[in-house]
Amino acid sequence: MPELPEVETTLRGIQPFLLGQTIEGLVVRDGRLRWPLPPDLPERLRGQSIHGLSRRGKYILIATDAGTLILHLGMSGSLRITEAELPPRKHDHYDLVLTGGKRLRFHDPRRFGCLLWTESDPELHALIAPLGPEPLSAVFDAGYLHARSRGRRAAVKTFIMDSHVVVGVGNIYASESLYRAGIAPQRAAGDISRQRYARLAESIREVLLASIEQGGTTLRDFVNESGNPGYFRQTLNVYDRAGQPCRACGTAIEAARQGQRSTFWCPRCQR
DNA sequence: ACTGGCTCCTGAGGGC
DNA sequence: TGCCCTCAGGAGCCAG
């Protein structure tokens, strides 16, 4: 379940293996992803050299001279660097083969991920252009959230999970950020003060940064074997803790469904 | 312009 | 031990 920290960790993990390398080919075992893998992609990629890797939201962008690969991990996707002779496991849907034998191998049991191709500026791509700001950038602050939320009756949790508002806040970190900010998840986004949004913006930043740091410690594992950058290991305050005592006040953590998603919060600490 | 609900997919976990 | 059911989730899409 990659959230932004996992994607960032993945990007940092694969970058040294890809940058400056030449693509020998693309091996597709199952192109039925969120969007079908473009059938002509292997021939387009052959011989291209990779001159840049970046991230926009949870999309990983791999730039070549001819165009840019747009990769998303969905919710169960992972990437790893393998040696050529390593036999594929179940759900290893494609390999980006590099000259020299190493491969970038995409694994995704649920196939919610994707691999797309654009020959224009990727920032203008239909999936990228409407995205909100990066939560770790300077423009993401109280003023932005406050202005953007006026008149909106949707719950604040739904609001911050909308990638058109801000990218990279998934279900787990949405609950954790709201807990840290002391805001009840079902409160209407438009009713929250600028001051409380200042705290929320800061909380989102802190939760994401802490998690990126943790991902950093498992970088080596990720590249070599597990592919499991570990937010499971980090201490969650509310997520999946229904009925358990709040770490701050001891009140039982509550759980509810919100927009098809599970939400957890402390009824005493969050108002 | 918003909002909420639906959808894709497979594996895990619970109940019996 | 095995079967069936439900649930989990990113995020685009669409109807209202």
Image: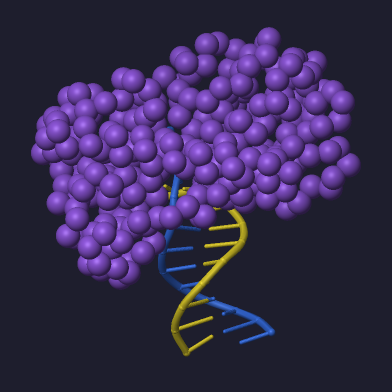
Chain colours: A purple, B yellow, C blue
Residue B13 placement (x, y as % from top left) = 51, 72
Residue A209's place in the image compared with A41, above or below, is below
User: Residue visible at 25% across and 38% down?
Assistant: A200
In the picture, measured across the screen, residue A13 lies left or right of residue A237, that is: right
The quadrant in which residue A32 appears is top right
Residue A56 placement (x, y as % from top left) = 48, 25
User: Residue visible at 38% across and 23% down?
Assistant: A137
The quadrant in which residue A243 appears is bottom left
Residue A197 placement (x, y as % from top left) = 20, 34
User: Residue visible at 14% across and 31% down?
Assistant: A194
Observer able to see residue A113: no
Seen from the viewer's position, the closer of residues C14 and A226 is A226
Seen from the viewer's position, the closer of residues A99 and A196 is A196
Residue A107's place in the image compared with A69, above or below, is below
Residue A184 placement (x, y as % from top left) = 19, 51
The quadrant in which residue A168 appears is top left
Residue A187's place in the image compared with A251, above or below, is above
Observer able to see residue A226: yes
Seen from the viewer's position, the closer of residues A80 and A162 is A80
Residue A227's place in the image compared with B16, above or below, is above
In the picture, measured across the screen, residue A99 lies left or right of residue A38, that is: right
Seen from the viewer's position, the closer of residues A13 and A25 is A13
In the picture, measured across the screen, residue A205 lies left or right of residue A27, that is: left
User: Residue visible at 44% across and 41% down?
Assistant: A210
- Please tell me how many numbered marks the rendered image carries: 0
